[in-house]
Image (spheres, rainbow, N blue to C red):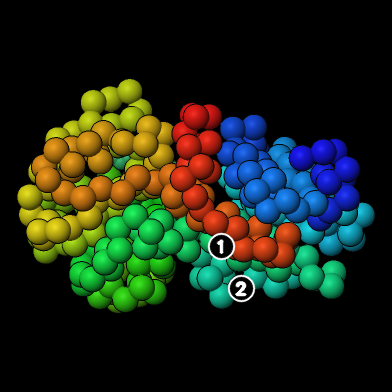
Amino acid sequence: MDDSRETQGPKAFVTGYPVKHSRSPLIHGYWLRQLDLAGSYRAHEVSVEEFASFIASLKDDTSGFVGGNVTIPHKEAAFKLADRPDALSEELGASNTLWLQDGVLHATNTDGRGFTANLDERHPGWDRGDRALILGAGGASRAIIQAVRDRGFKEIHVVNRTVERAQELADRFGERVHAHPMAALGEVMQGVGLFINTTSLGMDGEAAPWIDFSPLVQGAVVTDIVYVPLKTPLLAQAEEQGFAIVDGLGMLLHQAVPGFEKWFGRRPVVDETLRALIIADM
Ligand code: ATR
């Protein structure tokens, strides 16, 4: 794309601290070129101390930005500072996508949509069962609990090393969500058709513990939100044991779609070329 196209169109950003490892500029840059649109999308490192004034400058429209993505550690602050967070962000208390409309700063959270769109694309029918299991109770786990609940799962079991964190989520998301300690994993897996890992288990220098996936229902799908490496130790184990697996890269790609559409006015497509571009950058 020539320089004038970047300087003329709408300007969007990704902000975080640090933000240099973000793959979002690669994703949005690819779509801008593919759709031949004028516009730019750049990484903007903003510290915790500077974040409120960064948001204020957006609202004053002195920056020229139409909106952007927000990543760690600013998702909660983005939600609090937005004029109009939607119901999804409201329930999570965190937003990852902002856009300005008539001077009003809107916010949503697209992580859950990214999660479901990835599974819809790579394993249609993933949502047929009643019982889902989520390993981990951090920030990413919340958006996934919400998405899986809204997709109609009747029982959502959160298993976490620190059971108190899982219990907080169960209290927050209501009667369909249940908390369990790690020791209960095998038992809780009985009858589960969707197993989701949101932890870095087996990737922090320690060997991955062996997980016996056999209590899962036949045809169950195992997915991970971590995408480096694409096949995490846990996915490799599940595949070896004959279960379908879905990697987490598509979640990253699909969560970017709604923001792009808001800022640049066209709905982009997640295609294999984009996947290959991100994989080549890993
Ligand atoms: P994120 O916001 O990306 O989900 P997080 O809030 O740091 O990240 O949460 C990480 C999750 O991985 C937590 O559920 C954590 O368990 P604890 O709540 O007990 O800390 C889990 N996790 C990380 N390393 C783990 C390990 N070695 N064994 C088991 N769970 C682990």
Q: Amino acid at mark 2?
A: Asp
Q: At which x and y percent is residue 65?
A: 82, 54
Q: Are marks 2 and 1 in contact (CB under 8 Å)?
A: yes
Residue occupying the point 35% across, 45% down:
247
Front-lying residue, 212 or 185: 212
Task: Label 2: state its secondary structure.
Answer: loop
Q: Mark 1 sits on what residue? A: 109
Front-lying residue, 48 or 154: 154
Task: Label 1: state its secondary structure.
Answer: loop
Q: At which x and y percent is residue 157?
A: 25, 62
> Disc number at residue 243?
none
Q: At which x and y percent is residue 19?
A: 64, 36
Q: Is residue 107 above or below residue 180?
A: below
Front-lying residue, 168 or 32: 32
Quadrant containing the N terminus in the rendered view: top right
Q: Is residue 13 left or right of residue 232?
A: right
Q: Mark 2 sits on what residue? A: 86
Q: Is residue 45 above or below residue 219?
A: above
Q: At which x and y percent is residue 200?
A: 35, 37
- Pointer 1 local density, CA inside 10 Å: few below 14, some 14–19, many at least 20: many
Q: Is residue 214 left or right of residue 103?
A: left
Farthest right residue in view: 62
Q: Amino acid at mark 1?
A: Asn
Image quadrant where residue 90 sits: bottom right
- Pointer 2 local density, CA inside 10 Å: few below 14, some 14–19, many at least 20: some
